[in-house]
Amino acid sequence: MSNAKIRSQKQTSIGNKVGICVSNAILLALSILLAMAAGELALRVAVRFKCLPRDRGFAAFALQRDVRRIYVRGAYDGNDLGLFRETPGSELRWEPVPSAHAGAIRINAGGFRGPDVYFLPVQGVTRIAILGDSQAFGMNLAESDTLAGALERKLNTTSRKGKFEVLNFGVPGYNTQQEMLVFRQKVLVYHPSFIVLYYSLNDPEIPDSTVFLGSGPLSSSYLYMLAVYSFKVHSSMADLRRESRDLVDYYIRLHESVYFTRCAELIRQMAAESESHGALFYLVIAPEVNGFEHFASYPYEAIHARLRDLESGPLRVIDPLTSFKSAYDSPVTLWVNDHDIHFNAVAQSLVADLVAKRILSKTISQ
């Protein structure tokens, strides 16, 4: 047999082996993809049809896209108000409906509570933006009794250096992640000189998907969720809720968790970005008025201390707790009513006093 024929047979043999290897690799890849698809489907079916307990473990983690819910079709406290709408494809999840109106609440064309305003403040007017959740929004308060309304009134009756305008960007149910999005998408375009983040103790209720999964293309895969849950998640939001004895214990655990760590990162980030836009940033802590009977036994002192420790550089902290404890005995006196335990006008006014003093001290020194 000639050398050429031998070489040809060897090349053919090698080619056949390569072809077989490629075919095997393709079959293996297809098998893996099919197995993954089957696993994905099996996990979704198990969660969807309650084959796994939904109050704990992986199923609770997979379902927990956002722990706080709002009736985005407009229902709040059982009343169909038409004030909110879903935002498909947006991490905001819901938002106020621009130009909506119900009772004492008006949503302006920009999509936040209050009168219509221009993007640029009028010359001689100092603009302040308030971020927050339902505590800032003030669902059952008149516009003038919210923190924004009370602060604007106090500044304009006290200051001798021009006028002040306070914008209310609070939205019921929002967590710090959503407040960051509002900060970037809405607040900055109105050019405020001061930005106030009105912090409630449930603000770190950031979705597991944000804290552990990120926002990449894999974040919605149940297989990926299972891998993350198995190797990274020591205690999910559902676990925190289930394992807590009561509201006090829950808030303490929440502020010792990775959720608060992420929350603190976002707050520092907002403060730094505010400074880069020429605005002063204040973190204002809303004392909790639920879970205890008397301010003398206020159970959230350690959480306030943890929040005050965030102060540094562009991040300034205002804590009204001492003023609350010296002025009031029972937290019930600061509720809107027995069905709404958010701050009433009296509590909002007290917070506004403290914020106004800090802001005026800065405007006087400028």
Image (tube, rainbow, N blue to C red):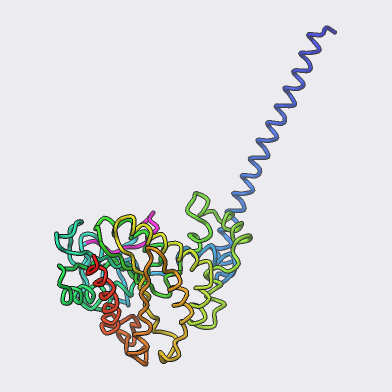
Q: Nearer the viewer, residue 287 or 207?
A: 287
Residue at figure coordinates x 27%, y 85% from the top left: 346
Q: Nearer the viewer, residue 140 or 28?
A: 140
Decide if residue 252 is on the left or right side of residue 343: right
* Rendering coords of residue 137 (x, y %): 29, 72
Number of marks in picture: 0
In which quadrant of the rendered view does residue 43 lie?
bottom right
Give the farthest residue toward the right.
1
* Rendering coords of residue 330 (x, y %): 37, 92
Q: Nearer the viewer, residue 294 or 310?
A: 310
Q: Is residue 91 magenta?
A: yes
In which quadrant of the rendered view does residue 363 lie?
bottom left
Decide if residue 224 is on the left or right side of residue 318: right
Give the farthest residue toward the top.
2
| 252 lies above or below 233 | below
* Rendering coords of residue 196 (x, y %): 31, 68
Q: Is residue 320 magenta?
A: no
Magenta part, dominant SS: loop
Residue at figure coordinates x 45%, y 69% from the top left: 205
Can you say which quadrant of the picture contains the C terminus?
A: bottom left
Residue at figure coordinates x 56%, y 63% from the top left: 47
Q: Which residues are magenta?
A: 88-98
| 36 lies above or below 28 | below
* Rendering coords of residue 30 (x, y %): 63, 40
In which quadrant of the rendered view does residue 287 lie?
bottom left
